Amino acid sequence: MKNVKVILALCLSGFFANAQLSNGGFESFVTLPTCPSSYDITKASSWNGLRTTYSGANCNNSVVDVLGTPSNVDYFNQSAGGTSSCQNGTPRTGNGYVVCEERGFVGNSPFNELIFQSLSGSLSAGTQYQFRCYVNRFTSTASLAYFNVYLVNQSVGSTASAIMNAVRSQSGLVGPLSGIPTGTGWKVFEKKLTVPSTGNYYLVIGDMFFCNDFNSSTLFRWGIDDVEFGVACANAGPNKNNSRAGGCCGPCNPSSVQIGTPAQAGYSYSWLPTTALSNAAVAQPNASPCNSTIYSLTASGPNCVTSTSTVYVIPIPGPSCCKLSAVTGIKEEAEEKEAFFYPNPASGLVNISLLTPPQEIKIIDLNGKTVFIDHRISTLNYSIDISKFSKGLYFLNIKTDQKTESHKLIIN
């Protein structure tokens, strides 16, 4: 039997906020699924399925949403007497896992399937949560297929349409994606999440971007196993500025600035790189770099999900300096930035760290065409999948309450 991840409790401002995921390893069942065809998702304890069927040739046409047994989400469990003889693939660990299906808009009725669970307890606004699961693309004609996770406030209602409409309002047809390679076994998918308001939430897992998955008529099958969700152990804190007394054209003489957040009892901490840190194994070391540095914190502990978090320390040059090399790798005018991103050049994910939540993030090509836009951003750490973009020079525009910044982004 695999370990089932049941998470968590976190002390926040003097009270405990609790959220609990049940049966993350899909080991527990209401009824053991069996062959040849009795293996729907409702047999798995705590989980349910969602299915959307589209009536026309694209995602703008009318839809029919269902949940439960009609969702056709498969639950396999290879315990004795279970589904070993008829299941798709094998679990990552233990005996249980689920398989969802989807089909694009060429030649067949398009549909997609997701899974969800009602988290027990409440989630708190302002708290960063860590999601992790493993995904296996058993069948797909595309080199990459896309996957995401959503938190939906249970106040929307409990019908399939209410939940799916809430998911669709979060995702749209563009947004942050994570590519899952096909035919390469179980791959980890991780994402940090926050909620806009304290309350009870559904955790919804699946591919809401399948409208753009090459319009294939092939039936895609992908498995999900070993789900974790809870408060993220790691919190590297807000981005910081230190000073370079001599400017970047003279001696460094850096000042020291504290990064991270207060230590939690029983947690372990590890910072990388260790350059210019007072202690890489504590929650709040002092950092005194001469150059812009991205510090990554990995933390683990009781009642939380092991995670990583990043913080940027940006030295402010003295008045003698004309330019400063930013963490992007492209020299820009020395000024305090609202956002920093890496890597650059990039070919997969571009990671953005923000001082304040932006109103809009947009990528524009040299012809002035907007190739990516997102208005629904509530996190300070944000990633964009650019793997489908053509190689070349782009502009990454970030709009905040104060200003709009434009950064050069090279995709190679």
Image: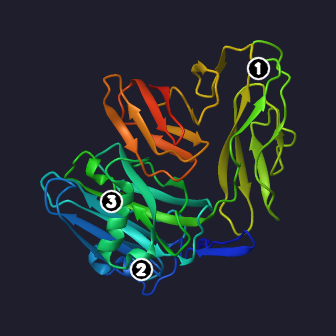
Quadrant of residue 69 in the image?
bottom left
The residue indicated by pointer 1 is: 318
**Who comes first in sequence, dot 3 or dot 2?**
2
Q: Nearer the viewer, mark 3 or mark 1?
A: 1
Q: Earlier in the sequence, mark 2 or mark 1?
A: 2
- Horizontal placement of 17 versus 185: left or right? right
Furthest residue in direction front, as rendered: 402
Q: Amino acid at mark 2?
A: Gly
> Under tag 2, what secondary structure?
loop
- Residue type, numbered disc 1: Gly
Pick whichever, 149 or 193, lies toward us.
Answer: 193
* Figure check: 100 above or below 412: below
Residue picked out by circle 2? 82
- Badge 1 marks a residue whose secondary structure is loop
Q: Position of residue 59 (x, y in %)?
A: 22, 55
Question: Quick one: label 1, few (<14), some, or many (20+) residues within 10 Å?
Answer: some
